[in-house]
Amino acid sequence: MKKLLPFFTLLFLLAGVLHAQTPMFFNTNVVSGTNVFPFGSTTNKVQWCIPAGSLGTVTAGNNITTVYFQSGGAYSNTYPLINIKLKTGTSAGLTGTAAGPWEPGMTVVYSGTAVPLTTTSGQWFGFTLTTPWLYNPALPLFVEVEQNSTSANQGICQAVNITGAGNGRQWGTFGSTAITSTGLNQVNFGIDVLPATPCTAPPAPNSALPVSFTTCPGITNPTIGLATTYTFGGITYQWYASTTS
């Protein structure tokens, strides 16, 4: 028998791609309306309007840490570059027009190179933001994705037409300065959040539970947890186990 003593370290969020994980909050989970905007080889820049209050019960005072899209099929692609930008919008929604300028003032929250993406139909895939975004559910959220692959074919669900002011999306090509066209399609979109109160100092001392346990082959190990939970955001937990006391 080996005695395992669990311990933990706290890590700041790292940017990356998540697969097969349902978002904490989302507007719809219905798989339909597959469209390759903007993860295909053309029309690879899109701005969407996510209407106020459309992402379920998420409340004010939270930072978006991950954004999600829902795949409409089985795909495997590697993207040379993916950029994601966010902006807190206005009640007017997106107001762009064909041949007009893109929505200004967007902030880069994720930028990745050589990004691998393999999905199955109905699977959510997410991007952990380099810079968390303070979410205001009382106002629309503007989302921009652009990528520069010349061979990608990833489709995402965008079946429902947006209601209310502002078009659902406006699209064009990577690096373009003008919108190609606009439409009403609403993207299946989700988010993970953490409380906006940041970790500004080393967290208070804590301990893992159980303090120790013994295990043998074929025995289910107990769940490891923290004696005291933290209420601020900006950290994740990485667990380690050692066979040495």
Image (cartoon, rainbow, N blue to C red):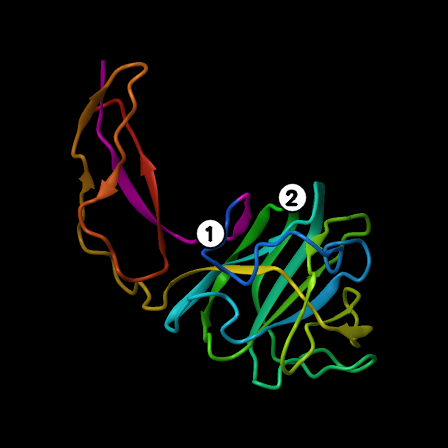
Q: Which residue is mark 2?
A: 116
- Residue at 78%, 82% in the rendered image: 97
Residue at 52% over, 70% down: 54
Q: Position of residue 218 (x, y in %)?
A: 32, 15
Residue drawn at x 69%, y 49% as measured from the top left:
72
Above or below for 75 versus 68: above
Image quadrant where residue 36 sits: bottom right
| 144 sits to left or right of 8 | right
Q: Position of residue 59 (x, y in %)?
A: 39, 70
Q: Main secondary structure of the magenta part?
A: strand
Q: Which residue is mark 1?
A: 14
Residue type, numbered disc 1: Leu
First along the sequence among labels 1 and 2: 1
Residue type marked 2: Pro
Residue 26 rendering spot, x and y as whole percentages: 52, 60
Quarter assignment of residue 68: bottom right
Write the start and end of the magenta stretch as one range: 1-20
Q: Is residue 33 above or below residue 137?
A: above
Q: Is residue 118 left or right of residue 55?
A: right
Give the SS element for disc 2: strand
